[in-house]
Amino acid sequence: MHEIEPYYNWRSIYIASEDPNSPFYGQQYSEFEFSNAIYDYFIHPQWDKFDSNTLYLKILYVNYDLHYCVIELLGEWNDALYNDIMHLYRNAIESLLEHDIIHFILIGENVLNFHSDTSDYYEEWVDNTGAGWIVGLNFREHVIKEITDANLDYYIGIGGKFDDFPWRSMLPDQLFRKVDAMITKRLEI
């Protein structure tokens, strides 16, 4: 797991630790010291901790004019034992919402498991996006099943055309416009 790095091709246009509005502003990273772990497995030091025991993230891009962000996730999303959604919402998402970010693209290809609990924080998150949305791209099939079995797909657009999505071949604004068009089309049906 220590070799899985956050996507870095957009670092020339955005770095969360250099964004004064980011919840990770001023964060210092080591390239050589591995201190964060998921269970007994060290992870790459570029991932950001937000008080979850098993889930880490990296804010890959934020566009304050178009009101969206792209967040990559790594680990086990465990609401049942660790209330990860609460930590994610309180320690990262709320800060973004305060800066009028209402569209959230979650990259989930490195989310290994999902364990649900209540939907309270998902409801609050959606309520606070207003006309915005939350989309999960490239989550693993068994993770999508867990999310849909818990009826959380009511809050997060996931599965279907959001699987095997070629997001790495796009620039952030292209990705946003493509996802926004897909969500709009889905809502019109």
Image: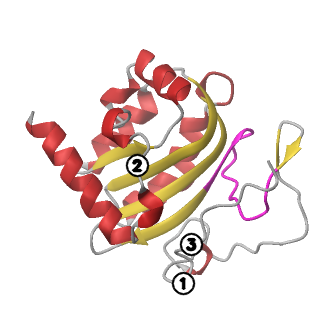
Number of the label disc, if any, that sits on residue 16: 3
Q: How many other residues sit within 10 Å of disc 1, few (<14), some (14-19) or many (≥20)?
A: few
Task: Name the image quarter holding residue 140.
Answer: top right
Gap between marks 2 and 3 measured at Cα: 23 Å
Q: Earlier in the sequence, mark 2 or mark 3?
A: 3
Q: For the residue marked with disc 1, what is the amino acid?
A: Ser
Q: For the residue marked with disc 3, what is the amino acid?
A: Ala
- In magenta, the rendered stretch is 43-57
**Residue linked to disc 2:** 165
Residue at x 79%, y 56% (from the top left corner)? 3
Gap between marks 1 and 3 measured at Cα: 11 Å
Residue at x 62%, y 75% (from the top left corner)? 17
Residue 187 placed where, x, y %? 14, 38
Judged from this view, the residue extending furthest toward the top is 149
Q: Earlier in the sequence, mark 2 or mark 1?
A: 1
Residue 50 located within the stretch drawn in magenta: yes
Task: Name the image quarter holding residue 87.
Answer: top right
Task: Name the image quarter holding residue 69.
Answer: bottom left
Label tally: 3
Residue 40 placed where, x, y %? 89, 38
Q: Secondary structure at mark 3?
A: helix
Residue 187 located within the stretch drawn in magenta: no
Residue 134 placed where, x, y %? 35, 45
Q: For the residue marked with disc 2, what is the amino acid?
A: Phe
